[in-house]
Image (cartoon, helix red, strand yellow):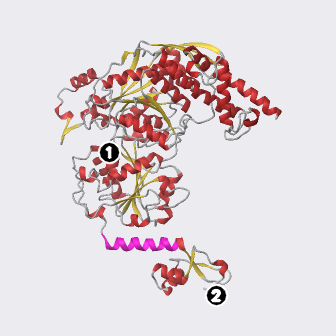
Amino acid sequence: MSSIDQSFIDPDFLTVAQAAKYLSVSIPTLRRWDESGKLPSVRHPANGYRFYRRAELERFRLEYQVAEAAANEQIIFETAQAHITGNLKLREPQRGAYAAARQHFAASNSPVILQLPVGCGKTGVIATLPFGISRGRVLVIAPNTTIRDGVASTLDISNPQCFWRIRGVLEAFVGGPFTAVLDGPDANIHDCLKSHFVVTNIQQLASSADRWLPKFPTNFFDMILVDEGHHNAAPSWRKVFERFPDAKVVSLTATPFRGDQKQLAGNVIYRFPFTTAMANGFIKKITSTNVVPSEIYFTYRGEDRRHSLDEVLALREEAWFSRGVALSQECNVHIVDESIARLKLLRANPKIRHQIIAVACSVDHARQVRALYEQRGLRAHEIHSGMDDEECEGILERLRRGTLDCIVQVQMLGEGFDHPPLSVAAIFRPFRSLAPYIQFVGRIMRVNAEGAPEDPDNHGYVVSHVGMNNDAHWDDFRELDLADQQMFHLWLTQQGAELDPSDGDGEGRPRRFDEGMLVSREILNEFVTNDPFLNVDDDRVLDQILSREIVAGVRLADVVADREAFRERLRAAQPSKETPAAPPVPVSPQRERQTGRTRLAEKSKSVANRIVADLGLDKRGYDLMNVAKLGRRHNLQAAIELMNREVNAELGQSSGARGELSLEQVKHALDNLDAIGDRVRDRLRAKLTKE
């Protein structure tokens, strides 16, 4: 080493002798590999000495270890006696998806998509797909840690609830399959070498840090299984596919399309319709219910307006109108009352304590909706991405224990969150595209009783307002589900690139509460509309119901003698197209005042946020500290304190006496909060200008 230029010495580079020792080969062998291009070296620009990059040597050594291991052991997916075809312990979609994938990969290596509704056993499909198809290790990629951990548990042969064990797929586990989980610093490459499945989440595998992906040779995995495969168009996922170009790629999803029109990797080779899943009891039977106004009164751009139902139906496609309905407390009340009525209907059977999941436009709107449920005696809480992990987990634990009746979310509780008691989906926002709508409705599809389509606990309701136009998505969802394969592919290729402006986290620029469409009064129709997903008037739906296998080899159609008489019996069991609207839930003045006080504090903070934004200040800056003479407080803290002072002045109330406010005072403050905020902002602007 003494003859080597010391300036070139780097721990990431090895000399020829060091590299030969590192790889356990001779120096002449290393030189031959260099000359042939098999393992090229780099040369010092001054003296021509050969050096090797440590990272290249590690990949090269790993490739040899993999090749050596493959030469000395049989691949379990080719040799194991897996009982899949004809296994009646597996669900029909699990057997069907496996058969379609096996047929495809016998002729082609192109990527594919399997479409299965939530609750139909996607994890079971992941567990069975490699057998008889994969010739090497399998990489399973989840979009988040929740799904990753669920899949890993299912594939853990030491788990008594291991899928292969409880479904009778495998009888012996002495040689595996073994599963490694890439879950942080405790995992390493040797775990992967000794395993048949490697389970990870996309952030762990292909983050900007690139901790894992470069460690794997390009032939390390023979199959890649992507859970929630509608994400696979994202750059991080594409990066993985490019790293393993010869791997068989299978994406599993309930919604094989995206609102941004990005092309997913693969063609759909298998679909299991939601209709069939409902008919078989794999997912709940869902009914869409909409509250319907006969008249609505509101102010828009300073103009007082009144519209009939027909006019509402014409206006609802306008974004300003549907969003105005969504944010209106008057309209929200009617959705709340109807969703509570549906909850009570489900809870008439005391076996399961059903719960409501609601979706709102923003964080403040979620708090508004939560307050309406609380006023009506329900235990409710909002949850959103701005909360820390510990707070979120505490709320979810209350939901799991049943100490919450309702949870109101903003872009949370999406993929991987499975909680069967959620049976009422209350929609307080207009969805601009179909995929997020289906994803949200999917949160109430998990059954409470397996394989029992007629069980009353396996029913769910989607409740919304006709003015938000979400029933159009319901119709599209059902029509898409019933379309044949050719029409389905046509629909996918013709989807518009419409982004959903409401699909963010609700933490955009703070809005004013006194602008836009302000609903003052809504007179409800005497009836609400009901639209079951399994509409038996549609022959396609009836065909799906009759195709249900009631015992091995026998379908319902085989024992139904009179198709039309059977249709009539089903029709009689369905809810009427129109049913009386839920009566208003009485709200005690005390509870209204208490929730109003909470909302006053929350909305004051929202207005303080707007004040800081209007002044063009950083929330964490200290510009207001001196002009407001409040001591050391950052701008947002200062604005909140000034807002509270101004509200107290408006109400003639001293500091610390909010508990003495009357209901009328609370309402007055809430109605005038933006004007109060404007006064605070204007005074601060004047002082900042003088500074």
Q: Residue at x 67, y 25 (%)?
A: 645
> Residue 523: x percent and y percent?
49, 12
- Residue sitting nearer the eye, 504 or 643: 643
Is 69 colored magenta in this rendering? yes
Q: Is residue 362 visible?
A: no
Q: Residue at x 25, y 30 (%)?
A: 455
Circle 2: element type: loop
What secondary structure characterizes most of the magenta part? Answer: helix
The amino acid type of the residue labelled 1 equals Gly
The quadrant where residue 274 appears: top left
Residue 437, percent from left and from top: 46, 34
The N terminus, quarter of image: bottom right
In this rendering, the count of numbered labels is 2
Instruction: Identify residue for label 2.
Output: 3
Nearer-N-terminus badge (2/1): 2
Q: Which residue is mark 1?
A: 121
Residue 80 image position (x, y, % from top left): 25, 61
Examine the structure image and report whether residue 480 is included in the region drawn in magenta.
no
User: Nearer the viewer's eye, disc 2 or disc 1?
Assistant: 2
587 shown above or below 146: above
Boundaries of the magenta span: 56-73
Local packing at callout 2 (Cα closer than 10 Å; few below 14, some 14-19, many 20+) is: few
Q: Is residue 52 above or below residue 604?
A: below
